[in-house]
Image: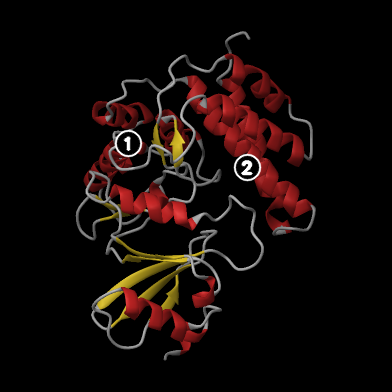
């Protein structure tokens, strides 16, 4: 086997034997290449003669019970096959830790383009506009899925999504806070008092953004939605608001597009993007300042947690200052949306 095949930290021979016993049409020795990109679940290209696969596994070591639930990832990818949501064909899930040390699943490799920059470098303005439209319609298609029809009615808790999430992230703030922040205090009071009355429930991705989409190699079409680790049942507008954060974040704030010449780039305004989504979505609910404030609050707490771990020596300390800055910036922006009295 090649040098790359001995680098993943598990027995490639055992993986090869298991795959050939359960997946038809595999020939030759597997060639493994780690996929970079910051996923918390290690991911590899697994190339055979004439067939290309992707393997996604849990990280080694002790894990929190609900973390790195790749069985849920596999389940939703498999369930969405045949819907209007583009997903890679799911081939195999293995819970037997004796094969490579952790549970894993394998899917067919989909050819396409992945962009980790919201400006979609190298793309014409016309294609860029079409790609953003495809992103909006794909999200709507995902939210339109009948969860009972695809066997996912028990994929999460229905109802009270925002109340549960606000409570969760408020507790997380108290556990990770390294400073006082009057904007977070404002949000902790304001958000529970302004949850919209509708209790729409759909599948939610949890991290729907440009970097988790694969576009067709030549066409402005989404060919696969990636990274399903945070997917569950929830409120569809939580996904939309998370995606729309790019329009209210600057380029040095987690790669946002605020302040750029969107018209020249061919990127729709936030209102245009939301309109594209709303035209395709079936639930009929409107994105509000509440949804945007919640999305920003959630990420402020996430960044505060990263900063806290860095200060404690459990993460890259070089990033502590930057993530702390992002936490404060997102909290400030969220609080600006809460002008209504409590």
The residue at which mark 2 appears reads as 302
Residue at the spot 35% in from the left edge and 87% down from the top edge: 29
Q: Are marks 1 and 2 in contact (CB under 8 Å)?
A: no
Residue 259 visible: no
Q: Give 133 or 99, whichever is nearer the viewer.
A: 99
Q: Quadrant of residue 329?
A: top right
Q: Give 257 or 275, whichever is nearer the viewer.
A: 275
Above-or-below relation of 306 to 56: above
Badge 2 marks a residue whose secondary structure is helix
Above-or-below relation of 300 to 41: above
Q: Quadrant of residue 54?
A: bottom left
Q: Give 320 or 64, whichever is nearer the viewer.
A: 64
Q: Give the percent coordinates (x, y) of residue 254.
A: 53, 46
Q: Give the percent coordinates (x, y) of residue 224.
A: 30, 53
Relative horizontal placement of residue 155, taking residue 160 as reference (left or right): left
The residue at which mark 1 appears reads as 148
Badge 1 marks a residue whose secondary structure is loop
Kindly report the distance in space between the C-alpha atoms of the residues bearing marks 1 and 2: 32 Å
Residue 1 visible: yes
Q: Residues within 10 Å of mark 1 (few under 14, many from 20)?
A: few
Residue at the spot 31% in from the left edge and 66% down from the top edge: 109
Q: Give the percent coordinates (x, y) of residue 112.
A: 28, 61
Q: Quadrant of residue 59?
A: bottom right
Residue at the spot 64% in from the left edge and 23% down from the top edge: 187
């Amino acid at each position: 086997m090649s040098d790359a095949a001995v680098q993943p930290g598990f027995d490639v021979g055992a993986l090869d034997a298991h795959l050939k016993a359960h997946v038809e049409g595999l020939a030759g020795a597997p060639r493994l290449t780690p996929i970079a990109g910051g996923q918390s679940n290690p991911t590899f290209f697994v190339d055979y003669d004439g067939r290309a696969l992707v393997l996604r596994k849990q990280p080694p070591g002790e894990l929190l019970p609900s973390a790195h639930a790749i069985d849920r990832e596999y389940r939703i990818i498999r369930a969405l096959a045949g819907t209007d949501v583009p997903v890679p064909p799911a081939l195999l899930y293995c819970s037997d830790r004796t094969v490579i040390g952790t549970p894993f699943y394998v899917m067919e490799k989909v050819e396409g383009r992945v962009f980790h920059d919201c400006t979609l470098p190298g793309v014409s303005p016309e294609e860029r506009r079409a790609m953003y439209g495809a992103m909006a319609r794909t999200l709507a298609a995902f939210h339109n899925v009948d969860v009972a029809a695809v066997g996912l009615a028990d994929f999460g808790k229905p109802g009270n999504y925002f109340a549960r999430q606000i409570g969760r992230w408020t507790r997380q703030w108290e556990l990770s806070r390294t400073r006082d922040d009057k904007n977070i205090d404002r949000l902790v009071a304001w958000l529970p008092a302004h949850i919209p009355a509708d209790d729409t429930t759909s599948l939610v991705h949890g991290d729907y953004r440009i970097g988790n989409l694969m576009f067709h190699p030549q066409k402005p079409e989404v060919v696969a939605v990636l990274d399903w680790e945070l997917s569950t049942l929830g409120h569809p507008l939580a996904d939309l608001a998370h995606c729309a954060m790019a329009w209210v974040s600057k380029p040095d704030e987690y790669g946002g597009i605020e302040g750029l010449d969107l018209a020249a780039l061919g990127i729709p305004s936030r209102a245009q993007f939301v309109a594209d989504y709303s035209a395709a979505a079936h639930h009929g609910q409107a994105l509000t300042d509440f949804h945007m404030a919640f999305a920003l609050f959630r990420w402020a707490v996430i960044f505060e947690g990263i900063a806290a771990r860095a200060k404690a020596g459990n993460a890259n300390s070089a990033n502590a200052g930057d993530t702390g800055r992002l936490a404060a910036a997102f909290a400030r922006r969220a609080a600006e949306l809460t002008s209504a009295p409590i």
